[in-house]
Image (cartoon, rainbow, N blue to C red):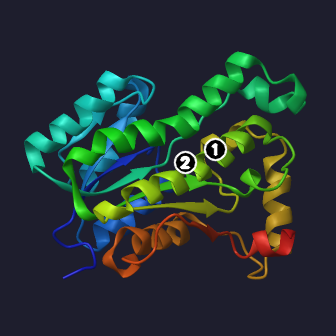
Amino acid sequence: MGLMTGKRGVIFGVANNKSIAWGIAQQLHAEGAELAFTFLNEALEKRVRPLAESLDSNIILPCDVQNEDEMVAVFSELEKQWGKIDFVVHAIAFANREDLKRPFSQTSRDGFRLALDVSAYSLVSMTRCALPILQEGGSIITMTYLGSVRTIPAYNVMGVAKAALESSVRYLAAELGEQGIRVNALSAGPIKTLAAAGIADFKKKLSVAEERAPLKRLVNQEDVGKAALYLLSDLSSGVTGEVHYVDGGFSIAAG
């Protein structure tokens, strides 16, 4: 019997085996959870499907989080196959690379709107679609980063989007608490992922984080996965509306 035995949930945001979402999926599966996965497009399906199947998942669905109909379809299928679910993992963010490279004051209007829509509003719409089938005592988590509360070079509009995401977590937690549903965020330190490739001087950021962190090492997908396991399991039954840092203590050192 594992911490998640008998629990079912869906993970949005696996892109490949280096994804933070994949580290979360592995920890949940190891503790007995039954998982469903989504993918953005055909190219990503080719990466996601084999990974999902390796964890015995047979629910692997297309979903562009900017498309409300696709989001509704995901949860309709989960209801059809499972009835109810216990957790949702939101590990999705995006900003145009050119908006990350420019000075923040030069962020385009369309780029600002896109970053906020994909990275923050998608949590709101995802929660709305999940609520009809989310069990009392269920848990929703999302992924954030230190750039939400501090200026990080080249993070720019994504930092603003993450700040909006964290605020959304608090408002959702306040709203859903009466239903016994928890909403939290995990703030991971810099990790080599597909998304991180779009951030300028990322290797330098890794070096600085490792040097300044009290643990004197970088965190990895396994570290974040374990923290997610805590927030998605009954161990965190009294925790909601919070941002949990999993960064080797870098947020403390950077303060």
Image quarter hosting the C terminus: bottom right
Q: Between marks 2 and 1, how big is the CA–CA gap?
A: 6 Å
Q: Nearer the viewer, residue 54 or 255?
A: 255
Residue 231, position as x, y percentages in the image:
43, 70
Q: Which amino acid does label 2 sit on?
A: Ser
Residue 164 is labelled as 1
Residue 168 is labelled as 2
Residue 15, position as x, y percentages in the image:
47, 41
Q: Is residue 2 left or right of residue 155?
A: left
Q: In this view, does 106 lie to the left or right of 68?
A: right
Q: Is residue 210 left or right of residue 224?
A: right
Q: Which of 172 and 82 is in front in this view?
A: 172
Q: Can residue 61 be seen in this view?
A: yes
Image quarter hosting the N terminus: bottom left
Marks 2 and 1: CB-CB under 8 Å? yes
Asked where in the image residue 7 lies, by quadrant, the reply is bottom left
Residue 215, position as x, y percentages in the image:
73, 82
| SS class, disc 1 | helix
**Considering only vertical position in the picture, is 243 above or below 40?**
below
Residue occupying the point 37% across, 35% down: 39
| SS class, disc 2 | helix
Asked where in the image residue 228 lies, by quadrant, the reply is bottom left
Residue 227 is labelled as none
Residue occupying the point 36% across, 33% down: 46
Residue occupying the point 46% across, 59% down: 174
Q: Is residue 138 visible?
A: no
Q: In this view, does 201 lie to the left or right of 218?
A: right
